[in-house]
Image (spheres, rainbow, N blue to C red):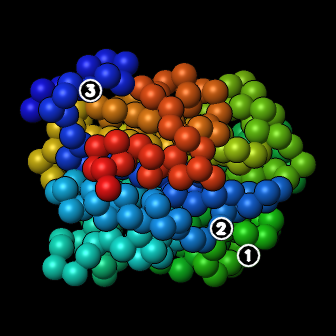
Amino acid sequence: MTAPVAGGAQPADWRPRMIALDIDGTLLSWIDGKGATHEDISPAVRDAVQRALDGGAHVVLASGRSAHGMTSIADLLGVPREGMERVWIVASNGAVILRYPPAEVVHEETFDAREAVRAVLERHPEALVAVEDRGVGYRLNKHFPEGELNGEMTITPVEELVAEPVSRVIIRDPQSTAEDFVRLAEELGLHGTSYVVGWTAWLDLAPVGVDKSSGLAFVAEQLGVDRDDVLAIGDGRNDIEMLQWAGRGVAMGQAVQEVIDVADDVTSTVGEDGAAVEISRWFPA
């Protein structure tokens, strides 16, 4: 198939063979004033995804969420349909890849987070720290604001949280801002660790070289899909590599400027069903 033209202009015969979808802020709308989203999918988005499936596209969820926080979204989207192969899910910003249903982890990347966590806590000693307790919830040093994490929560000393290699560490400081954490990460360097700052003072630490794009590259290889034939849609800083990697990377209308700057195109906001608008461009009703 002819590769997409740079800058988001696709040739007339182009149609995505794989669609990578962020969840929070892309499929789900944000709850005002909270770091959480409404757990429902609009009919327009669900219908657009179903048309993409009808058109032969592979739909892949790609999120910073843990694996157990993503399977319910697949259910809401209606993927996979009966008789279809299990859906691919890229969780924990690319560190965990699974098939569903049933949930089966097929690839996981881990790293030693002790030094990076120590460096951050020296600057933010009251910060909240969490690691995924896969399939269950999270182990964390203190409770996060309501709605920001899901699953069972087990209070655990920080030293125990990172005593063994982990796939992802979340550091959160409700008293700081996202801009504070952007400066912090730049100043510390966090050598040997990848990082991404969320909408709030939320820092995700991951193995070097692991992000949504690396996870999607793994999935695309399994599916026999070239990156030029991938459409990716997202809104957060953790979507930047994904949008740059995909043949067509589209930012949601409310995305932060860093995301818009790397995207091939910008769709409507999540409140205006921007994901449906973009998917419908290729799979019209």
Q: Which numbered mark, 3 or 2, is in the foreground of this view? A: 3
Of the 4 image quadrants, the one containing the N terminus is: top left
Q: Which residue is pictured at 51% across the width and 46% down the height?
A: 274
User: What's the distance in space between the residues labelled 3 and 2, CA to CA?
Assistant: 33 Å
Q: Nearer the viewer, residue 21 or 183?
A: 21
Residue 233 in view, yes or no? yes
Q: Position of residue 36 (x, y in %)?
A: 70, 62
Q: Which numbered mark, 3 or 1, is in the foreground of this view? A: 3
Within 10 Å of disc 3 (Cα), the crowding (few <14, some 14-19, many 20+) is: some
Q: Which residue is pictured at 34% across the width and 32% down the height?
A: 248
Give the structural element (helix, strand or loop) at label 3: loop
Q: Quadrant of residue 30?
A: bottom right
Q: Position of residue 21 (x, y in %)?
A: 42, 52
Q: Which residue is mark 2?
A: 38
Within 10 Å of disc 2 (Cα), the crowding (few <14, some 14-19, many 20+) is: some
Q: Which numbered mark, 1 or 2, is in the foreground of this view? A: 2
Tell me the kind of residue under disc 1: Ile
- The first of marks 3 and 1 along the sequence is 3
Q: Which residue is mark 3?
A: 10
Q: Is residue 91 left or right of residue 202?
A: left
- The first of marks 3 and 2 along the sequence is 3
Q: Relative to residue 184, is residue 233 depicted above or below?
A: below
Q: Is residue 262 left or right of residue 85?
A: right
Tell me the kind of residue under disc 2: His
Give the structural element (helix, strand or loop) at label 2: loop
Q: How many marks?
A: 3
- The first of marks 1 and 2 along the sequence is 2
Of the 4 image quadrants, the one containing the C terminus is: bottom left
Q: Which residue is mark 1?
A: 155
